[in-house]
Image (tube, rainbow, N blue to C red):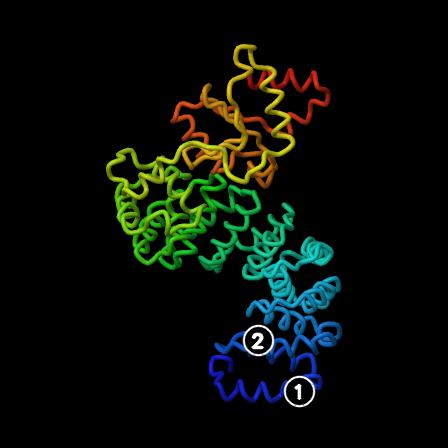
């Protein structure tokens, strides 16, 4: 049993390394699994297994392959050879049962080595027999597909439906919501089901799961519904034990979802009296700053270190280059301005107050031009219609609160106008 694995057992394994070439595929897979689930670190053992794993991965059963590749991923023993052979075997996807298939896909995706042809083979099988997967396997595949950037809306819908079952745990429900939000997709019925089930099970969530579900819902603009109270209460109870990453996620989620709570606000401010901006990564500083700017009206209650940080002047963002499309649109808009305004200062990728990245800013006009590509929207699963991304809505609300005019251009709408004259007329009507 891996739970009873001792130093003596590890010594025996190391003594047998020279004999690994004699192991049958199922024996090699069992050894790798035992080492992966034991508390002992043994990179030398996995290196030895890697050297002889070729035949097992080519000739072993789907179960053996899934066990081997899962074991390597579980201990972060990144082996291009093992992962590529696992991809090859997934092309023969019928060799795997559903759990083995899910484990193998999870493994290659978790180390960023999933190949498109392997994922396509899995996808084709799922389209034929998605109802044969349980909620655990479906959640693993959802998360794995998103990590591998293999987002197929029809597959997401099929797998999401398998998770909407009474026996799904909070972790599986949270991971499903996270996967959909990360993929830029929203299913109103599924998210409503997840909120309903989590309402009475929020106390079972660890800090990361609570932060993830908050992030997922507000990112796609989904209401928390009756889960709001229980979730925020549970988050508040865990705040003292949360790390910096969790705290910034909570603060940003509250701001993005417009989930004001005086008690929770005061508790976060108390933590920020103990944690300065230096305790957070750059993204975390900005997320905390956005929450302070949006949710805390009384500047006097903001800790001094954070007040100094918020006082950062607006400036062009360091190291951020505007896209070709962005520069072309900026120049076109400048030429369309009334002549007295054509020389007004304009900045690409401007960071306002250290908080909000604006695509094109005209500070003297207090006007911002946002050029939105596909990544700025979420898609409703059944109709594929566009919805505003939660982070974009947060930025728009605060810029408008600062009395900036925010003009948004959808790149897809711009590109519909093929000639220069047609595009300029579209920009004149949309912007000027």
Say left or right for 120 vs 281.
right
Q: Residue at x 62, y 72 (%)?
A: 67
Which of the numbered marks, if any, corresponds to residue 98? none
| Residue for badge 2 | 43
The answer to whether marks 2 and 1 mark residues whose Cβ atoms lie closer than 8 Å is no
Total marks in image = 2
x then y, percent, for residue 53: 69, 76
- As rendered, which of 275 and 94 lies closer to the eye? 275
Left or right of 206: which side holds 148? right
CA gap between label 2 and label 1 equals 15 Å
Residue for point 71% across, 63% down:
87
Q: Position of residue 211 (x, y in %)?
A: 41, 51
Relative side of 295 to 44, left or right: left
Task: State which quadrant residue 380 falls in.
Answer: top right
Disc 2, SS: helix
Along the line of sight, the residue nearer the viewer: 53 or 352: 352
* Coordinates of residue 98 in the picture (x, y in percent): 64, 64
Q: Which residue is mark 1?
A: 18
Q: Which quadrant holds the C terminus? A: top right
Quadrant housing residue 69: bottom right
Q: Nearer the viewer, residue 74 or 380?
A: 74
Please tell me which residue is depicted at 49% across the width and 35% down the height of the picture: 357
Name above or below for residue 256 compared with residue 131. above
Dot 2 or dot 1, earlier in sequence: 1
The crowding category of the residue bearing disc 2, from other C-alpha atoms within 10 Å (few below 14, some 14 to 19, many at least 20), is some
């Amino acid at each position: 049993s891996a739970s009873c694995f001792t130093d003596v057992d590890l010594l025996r394994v190391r003594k047998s390394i020279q004999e690994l070439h004699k192991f049958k595929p199922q024996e090699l897979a069992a050894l790798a699994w035992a080492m992966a689930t034991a508390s002992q670190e043994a990179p030398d053992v996995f290196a030895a297994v890697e050297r002889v794993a070729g035949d097992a991965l080519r000739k072993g059963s789907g179960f053996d392959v899934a066990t081997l590749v899962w074991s390597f991923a579980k201990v972060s023993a990144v082996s291009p050879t093992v992962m590529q052979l696992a991809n090859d075997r997934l092309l023969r996807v019928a060799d795997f049962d559903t759990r083995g298939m899910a484990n193998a896909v999870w493994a290659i995706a978790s180390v960023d080595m999933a190949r498109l042809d392997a994922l396509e083979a899995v996808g084709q099988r799922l389209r034929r027999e998605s109802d044969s997967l349980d909620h655990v396997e479906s959640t693993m595949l959802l998360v794995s597909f998103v990590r591998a950037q293999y987002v197929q809306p029809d597959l997401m819908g099929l797998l999401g439906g398998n998770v909407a079952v009474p026996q799904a745990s909070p972790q599986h429900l949270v991971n499903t919501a996270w996967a959909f939000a990360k993929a830029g997709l929203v299913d109103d019925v599924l998210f409503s089901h997840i909120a309903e089930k989590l309402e009475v099970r929020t106390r079972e969530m660890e800090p990361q799961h609570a932060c993830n579900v908050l992030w997922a819902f507000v990112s796609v603009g989904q209401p928390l519904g009756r889960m709001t109270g229980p979730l925020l209460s549970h988050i508040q109870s865990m705040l003292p034990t949360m790390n910096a990453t969790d705290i910034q996620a909570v603060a940003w989620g509250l701001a993005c979802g417009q989930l004001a709570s005086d008690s929770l606000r005061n508790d976060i401010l108390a933590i920020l009296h103990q944690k300065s901006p230096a305790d957070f990564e750059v993204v975390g500083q900005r997320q905390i700053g956005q929450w302070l700017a949006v949710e805390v009206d009384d500047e006097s209650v903001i800790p001094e270190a954070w007040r100094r940080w918020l006082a950062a002047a607006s400036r062009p963002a360091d190291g951020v280059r505007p896209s070709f499309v962005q520069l072309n649109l900026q120049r076109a808009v400048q030429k369309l301005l009334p002549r007295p305004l054509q020389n007004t200062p304009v900045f690409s990728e401007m960071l306002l107050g250290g908080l909000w990245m604006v695509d094109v800013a005209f500070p003297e006009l207090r006007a911002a031009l946002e050029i939105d590509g596909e990544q700025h929207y979420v898609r409703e699963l059944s109709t594929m219609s566009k919805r505003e991304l939660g982070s974009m809505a947060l930025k728009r609300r605060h810029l408008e609160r600062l009395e900036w005019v925010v003009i948004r251009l959808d790149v897809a709408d711009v590109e519909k106008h093929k000639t220069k004259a047609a595009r300029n007329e579209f920009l004149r009507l949309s912007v000027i």
